[in-house]
Amino acid sequence: YYPGESSIRVNGRNVYENEHVHIGQYHTHELTVNKKFTISKEIWEYYYMDSIREACDPSYSADVAAILIQEGLAHIFLINKCSTTLKNKIKHNIPRKHKGHIESREKANVAFYSIIINSMLNNLNFEILKCVIFAGPGFYKDDLLKYIHSLSDDKYLIFKTNKFKFITADISSAFRHSLTEIFQNENILKKLSDTKAIMESKSLTEFYSMINSDPSRAFYGIIHVEAAAKQGAIETLLISDHLLRISDVVQRKRYLKIFNDVKKNSGVTRVFSEFHETGKELNQYSGVAAILRYPMDALNSIPLEDVLNDFGSLAF
């Protein structure tokens, strides 16, 4: 990979006869931005397909949304580690502050907020998002958030279940350039950092709690987790990204099989970064753990020797 040139060079032996390269001849090929190419594999794992989708679709990969709002103007952005994508620009006429215009101004603001909220429903994937920032000058961001919290219709239930992801920020305007003010604020950055790992942290806390309250529903180590996955018993899988990338192909396939089985059985998969504090904690429990849908006391009968042998084969 050549970051300065935004290109990847791959090399290998040619297996098909063509006018440019003979069969068996070694060849290097350069892949660059906007240059189409095809990759063929006998099996595409869920984890790798998810990684490709994250790289290609901002709505799939963006884990931060920013709603920039001021009087009569709002922008909705999706932000990931690589890009910032404008999903919608909303302009709405708000009557000026004059005596006699108070009621019409309030109605206009409610209509403005409703348009923003409907756009959020259409453009934001709350399963992926870790944080939603409401930012702007003055009181509009706070009033919008209050209005969202006041909604009682089932259509808006997703806002209530995700309200822990909402934070506010003071910035100078609702225009794109003001996004830099958000990411220059150390307090906001800390909140973003904390929020980014909140789903993983909640799952890890639930796992610890389950070990204490119902240990036959919480297991760790590849042998126990693998056995539970084969039975379709895993409700939540906690796994280190390190294990999905290890150089030992046989071991890697075992972890990918567990990951795929949980996905196929509608379980939740939480992939932890080995560099994050939560990932480091999980690695103390072998890097893979599971919360089960129902108790499986039989897993406790797996010989300790088998567990220790398998644990010893892991490379961290």
Image (tube, rainbow, N blue to C red):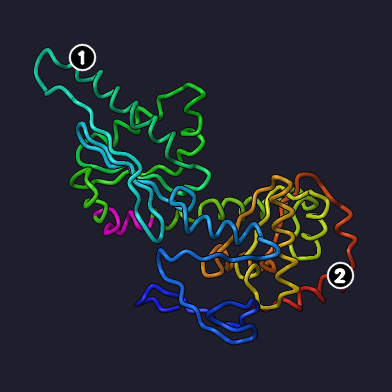
Task: Give how far across and how far down residue 254 sits, in percent.
Answer: 75, 66
Task: Give how far across and how far down residue 45 sits, in percent.
Answer: 66, 60
Nearest to N terminus: mark 1 or mark 2: 1
Q: Residue at x 70, y 60 (%)?
A: 289
Task: Give how far across and how far down residue 227 sits, in percent.
Answer: 83, 58
Q: Residue at x 66, y 55 (%)?
A: 208
188 inside magenta stretch:
yes
146 or 125: which is nearer to us?
125
Give the residue pinned by disc 1: 103
Task: Give how far across and how far down residue 3 sits, in percent.
Answer: 39, 76
Q: Which mark is residue 137?
A: none
The answer to whether residue 118 is above or below residue 124 is above
Q: Secondary structure at mark 2?
A: helix
293 inside magenta stretch:
no
The answer to whether residue 183 is above or below residue 149 is below
Give the residue pinned by disc 2: 304
Which residue reaches farthest front? 19
Per the model, the C-alpha gap separating discs 1 and 2 is 73 Å
- Circle 1: is it few (<14), some (14-19), or many (20+) Cα within 10 Å? few
Q: Main secondary structure of the magenta part?
A: helix
